Amino acid sequence: MATTIAGFVLRATNRQETARFYAELGLHTREHKHGGPAHHEVMPMADTCVMEIYAASPDFPKDALMLIVDSIETALQVASEFGIQATTDVSVLEDTKFVYITDPDGRPVLLIENK
């Protein structure tokens, strides 16, 4: 059997707030429990999901999530409602815009908008 990535676990200091943040960005969250503590499932999983490994640097010392969003501007408005601002400038590379923000736990999140 080939090894595959089964998913990601986010450890949050305030699980409800972090789930609400991702829900406001357009993902569906559902609280549930199976054999352990209650937690939130975040959906949908992308048909094409990647995991990339980069060397840590002073500018990017932590793991990051990558989210494809319909609109960087809308996502930045949602983030601002949580007191979160972009940590980089919005960049454009060919037909893709991207910017880093953080989630409520300080976890870097790369927002990607495909034109």
Image (cartoon, rainbow, N blue to C red):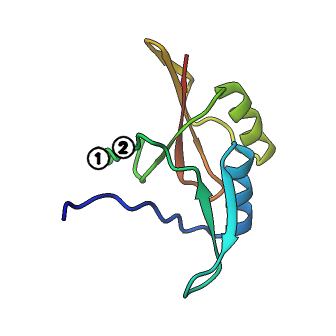
Could you say whether the residue bearing mark 2 is in a helix, strand or loop? loop
Quarter of the figure with residue 31 = bottom right
Position of 49 compared to 80: left or right?
Answer: left
Q: Position of residue 91 (x, y in %)?
A: 51, 20
Marks 2,1: beta carbons within 8 A: no
Quick one: which residue is furthest to the bottom in this view?
35
Residue 53 is marked as: 1
Instruction: Report the amino acid beneath label 2.
Output: Val
Quarter of the figure with residue 49 = top left
Kindly identify which residue carries mark 2.
Answer: 50
The correct choice, above or below, for 29 with respect to 49 in the image is below
Which one is in front, 18 or 44? 44
Q: At 72% across and 41% down in the image, what residue appears?
A: 79
Instruction: Report the amino acid beneath label 1.
Output: Ile
Could you say whether the residue bearing mark 1 is in a helix, strand or loop? loop
Give how far apart the Cα atoms at labels 2 and 1 are: 10 Å
Q: At 73% across and 66% down in the image, what residue appears?
A: 16
The correct choice, above or below, for 86 with respect to 113 in the image is below
Which one is in front, 6 or 96? 6
